[in-house]
Image (cartoon, rainbow, N blue to C red):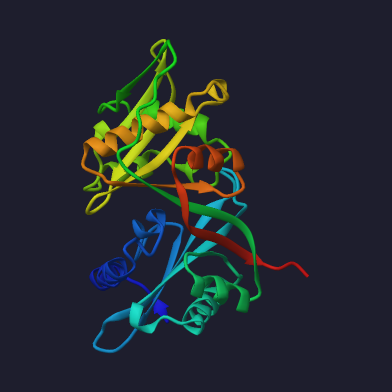
Amino acid sequence: MRHASIEDAAEVKNLLERCREVDGRPVLSEFKELRVPVANAVRTLVADAGAKSISIVAVAAWHPVDLGEDAGYWAAEIAVHPDLRSEAAYETALQQLTGDLGKVPSFWAFDELQHRAAGRSGLAEVRAIVEMRRALPADPFEWPGGYSVRPFRLGDESMWLALNQHVFSHHPEAGAIDSADLALRMAQPWFDPAGLLILESGGEPAGYCWTKMHDGSVGEIYMIGLTPEFRGLGLARPLTGAGLAHLSARGATVAILYAEEANRRAVALYEGMGFDVARRIALYERKES
């Protein structure tokens, strides 16, 4: 494997699109897909499979433990062409990335082959996220008095960044979104200001539900959260319901969302709203002896 360069962008995109066609979903997380083949604090290796076509992309991104500190960890993801997938392919790519980084990165496993490759590499599961799905439309939910929802408006960027930091202050990915990350997302073809719903109480932001339409008829509760002051007041269900209603109005017939498996309260809430677990994604780290 070799280091990727900007000249590899088209081939990398072709590989990721081929994987998406076969899997019916992105093969890398959005955070990393938006940053390959080259970006700050990202290391990307690729493998060629003849005729200059790229068959494997192994990408690691640096995640600081706390914003502004040097301490942190590398988190890796690997995409392999559907015709070449095997435990050995993922294991070898992870070994190559380890050698390049000089340390074993954490590794996100998205399917069974990757889960087994992580085990063969001596890694242990430390965190899991579940993908949940349900059919649309959904039954409407009534709002408690004193609350309202409005769409995001251009000019709300600073407000939303402060709100998101307050909502996800201890979340390793969502809480780290900065102005550049937000601008990158707003530049994507799927971004729709009307799909970013801001919950307000007395004119002040209390939370939000950001939705995302995928190709076809699949809609996603992309990000959702309440500030600590407004948790436990029965707002999570109607806020999610507002997002589902928006997706349904956009033509979605299936809704998906992602939740931390350890957050049993959130998982139970979504199960109570008709969601079922469709897939399990896990983060693996080196076993301590």
> Going by the picture, which residue comes out furthest to the bottom?
50
Q: In this rendering, would 169 be left or right of 24?
A: right
**Residue 175 visible (yes or no):** no
Q: In this view, does 222 lie above or below 13?
A: above
Residue 197 falls in image quadrant: top left
In the displayed orientation, state which residue is furthest to the right.
289
- Where is residue 173 drawn, in percent x and y? 50, 47
Q: Residue at x 56, y 20 (%)?
A: 229
**Most foreground residue, 35 or 258:** 258
As drawn, 286 above or below 235: below
* Left or right of residue 101, residue 46 in this image: left
| Number of marks | 0
What's the residue at 25%, 33% (across, down)?
A: 193
Q: Quadrant of the N terminus?
A: bottom left
Q: Can you give x and y, in whole percent of width and height, for residue 55 in the image?
A: 34, 80
Q: Quadrant of the C terminus?
A: bottom right
| 215 and 120: which is toward the camera | 215
Q: Quick check: 152 left or right of 272?
A: left
Q: In the image, residue 250 lies at what x, y percent? A: 21, 39
| Residue lying at 63% horizontally and 64% vertically, measured from the top left | 285
Of residues 270 and 41, which is closer to you in this image? 270
Residue at (36%, 36%) from the top-left corner? 210
Q: In the visual, does 69 lie left or right of 249?
A: right
Residue 177 visible somewhere in the drawing = yes
User: Could you tell me residue 96's position as x and y percent?
Assistant: 51, 79
